[in-house]
Image: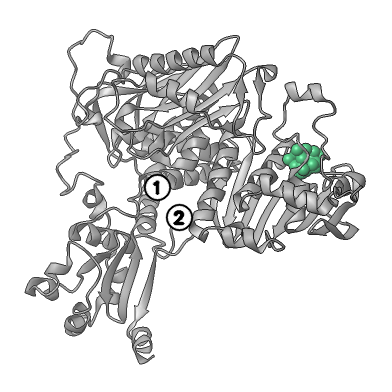
Amino acid sequence: MAASIIQLLPDHVANQIAAGEVVQRPASVVKELLENAVDAKASDIKLIVKEAGKTLVQVIDNGLGMNTTDARLCFERHATSKIRQAEDLFDLHTKGFRGEALASIAAIAHVEMKTKQDQEELGNHIVVEGSKLITQEVAVLPKGTSFAVKNLFFNIPARRNFLKSETVEFRHVMDEFQRVAMAHPSISFTLIHNGSELYNLPSSNFRQRIVAIFGGKTNEKLVPVAEDTELVKIAGFVGKPEYAKKSRGEQFFFVNDRYIKSAYLHHAIMSAYEGLLKEGNQPSYFLYLQVPPHTIDINIHPTKTEIKFDDEHSLYAILRSAVKHSLGQFNVAPILDFERDSNLDTPYQYKDKEADFPTIQVNSGFNPFATEKPSKSLSSFGSYKKETSQSNWESLYVGLKQDTEEIASFSFESEEVTGKLFEDDTIETSTSTYQVHKKYIVSAIKSGMLVINQKRAHQRILYEQFLTNITIQKAASQQLLFPLELYFSSDEMQLLKELQHTLENTGFVFDTFKADAIQISGLPVLMKESEVSMVLESLISNLQNEVPESSFSQSDTIAKSMAKSLAIKTGTYLTEKEQENVLNSLFACKEPNVSPFQKPTFITLTVEDLDKRFAL
Ligand code: ADP
Ligand code: MG
C-alpha cells in the first residue's frame, strides 16, 4: 500500500487561499472594513487611503468596539458575532456574517487594530502580519475601532503585480465608498486620499446624500419613486429621461441597505423607460428596496453583491410599474422632442390646472439682457463698489504700462483669447486678463503676475454681497412669471419659515408657506429658476449641520452656502469682460485674499520668482 498523500493545509495557507476570494484588490478591503464599521453601529466613519489603498487602507469608526478576547478572535477564520446557527442566514440584519474578511485580510497584509468599548477604561492595540500575531497590548484609546491595513499582498507578489494603475484602483475604492455611503445616509462619512479630503458627508437623508456625492446638479434630475407592498418597499429616485447619458454611470440598487448588482432588476427599470430614451442612452437610478430578510439569499457570492430573490417575477413587475408611475406622475413622459429646453417646461403642479390669465408682474429694474452671456450675470454686480474702492488694488497696476509688452508676449494657455494676444488694443489695455484652463484668471501686475482662482474669487464676491444684503441693504428680485412651488419635509419647512426674512433680503419673494410646500414668486437676481431647489436644499442641509450660536452665524452660514451654490464653477468659460469683472469685484471686497472658506483666492508671481525659474 502506498503512503497516504493527503494533508490538511496549515491555517495560514488556508487563509491565504480564502483571501483570494474575498480580497481581490484594495477596494475589497475598503468594502469589508466599512461594512464592519456599519455593523458596529458607528455614526461616524472615516476612510483614509494612501496610493489607492496599495500602501494603506484605514477605517476609523466610533462604533461598539470589541473586548480583549474578541479583539484577538476577530482575526480567526469563521469568527463572527453576527450569526450563531445556519437558520440565522435567513434572517440577516448585518452586512457581514461569514466571519472571513478579517482573517483573509490579516493573512495577506500588515494589520494594526485599535479598539475600545464605550464602558471600558482601556482598549486593545493589536498588530498582525501575515496571520501572525505580532503584539497585543492594552492602550488608552477613544471609543470605537480603527483598522489600518498596510502593504496589501506583501507576501503574494504575483497578486501585487496584478494590481492596476493607481487611477484604476482608486476608482474601485471610490465606488465602494460611494456605495456604502449611499446605503447609509444617516452615518457621516469622510474619505481622505493621499492626504486630501475628497468627501466629507454629513448625516443626511437619501436625497441629500446622493446630491452630496454626485453634485448639486443631480438634484434637479431626480424624480422620486415610492411604493409599499407586502413583498417589497421601494424608495429612492430615478433620473429624468432627458438627462440620460450614453455611459452607464449612476445606477444603484440597494436591497436591505446593501448595494447589489442585478441585471434582471436593471431590465425592469429599462423597460419602464421604454420609449422615453434615445437609442443607447442610460438613465440614472438610485433605488432602495426593503424586503423581508427571509425572502432573499445573499449567500451566493463571497462579496455578497449578488443576491437571489424568492419571487423575482413579482419584484420585477412592482419595480417596473413603480418607476413608470413616477415618470408619468411627474410629467416627464412621454417626451419625444429630446432637444427641447427643459427650462421651458411648465412646472408640473400646473399641468392639470386651468390656464388662468397670468397677471404679469415685471421688475423693471431687472434686465435679463444686461449681460453678454446668459450663464452668470457677472457684469450685473461687476459695477458693485467698483468705482469707489479701486484704490485698494489700483496700486498693483501702477507702473505697469511700460512692462506690458514683455509680459503680454508670454503665451498663455487659453483657447479663445490667445489669438488676440498680439493685437494692438490688447497690449494697450493695462489690465488685460487671460483665462487658463477655464479655472484661473491671469493678469499682469506691476510686480509680476496675478493668478486668480475664478471659483473661489466669485465665492468671496457673492459672499460679501449676500452678507451685505442680509444685514444692511435688501437686494433686488427678479419676478417670476409663474410662481414656483417646492416641496419640503416639515422640519425643513420649519427652518425655511425661520429664514424667511433673511432669504427675502437676498432677493427671494415668498407667496405662501403651506404645511409641506412654499410658493416662490421672486428670486435673487443671480439665480436661475433651475437652481432654486438645489440652492435651498444645500442651504437647509448646511444649516441643519450647524449649531447656530447667534443670528450672525446664521446669516454667515446662509451667505456662505448661497455663495458656494451660485459661484461660477471651475470649467466655466469667461469672456474678457467677465474676467475683468471678477478681478475688479474681488479687489473691491473687504477680504479679497481668501474665499469664505478661508482658502486663498489668488496668488502673485513676482518677476523675481519667474527669473528664478528661468535660471535653472
Ligand atoms: P463578519 O463581518 O462576517 O462577522 P469579519 O471578519 O469581517 O466577519 O469580522 C469578524 C468579527 O469582528 C465581526 O463579526 C465583529 O464581531 C468583529 N468586528 C470586525 N470589525 C469590527 C468593528 N469595526 N467594530 C466592532 N467589531 C468588529
Ligand atoms: Mg465583516
461 relative position to 336: left or right = right
Residue drawn at 31 percent across, 41 percent down: 475
State whether residue 46 is above or below residue 511.
below
- Three-letter code, disc 2: Pro
Q: Secondary structure at mark 2?
A: loop
Which residue occupies the foreground of this view, 519 or 218? 218
Q: Are marks 1 and 2 in contact (CB under 8 Å)?
A: yes
Q: Mark 1 or mark 2: name the one nearer the start of the chain.
A: 1
The picture quadrant for ligand 1 comes to top right
Residue drawn at 36 percent across, 45 percent down: 566
Q: In the rendering, at what x and y percent does residue 213 appear? A: 49, 42
Q: Which residue is mark 1?
A: 563
Q: In the rendering, at what x and y percent does residue 97 appear? A: 75, 34
Q: Residues within 10 Å of mark 2 (few under 14, many from 20)?
A: many
Whether residue 63 is visible: no
Which disc is residue 596 wearing? 2
- Three-letter code, disc 1: Ala
Is label 2 within 8 A of ligand 1 (CB to nearest ligand atom)? no
Colour theme? one colour
Q: How many marks?
A: 2
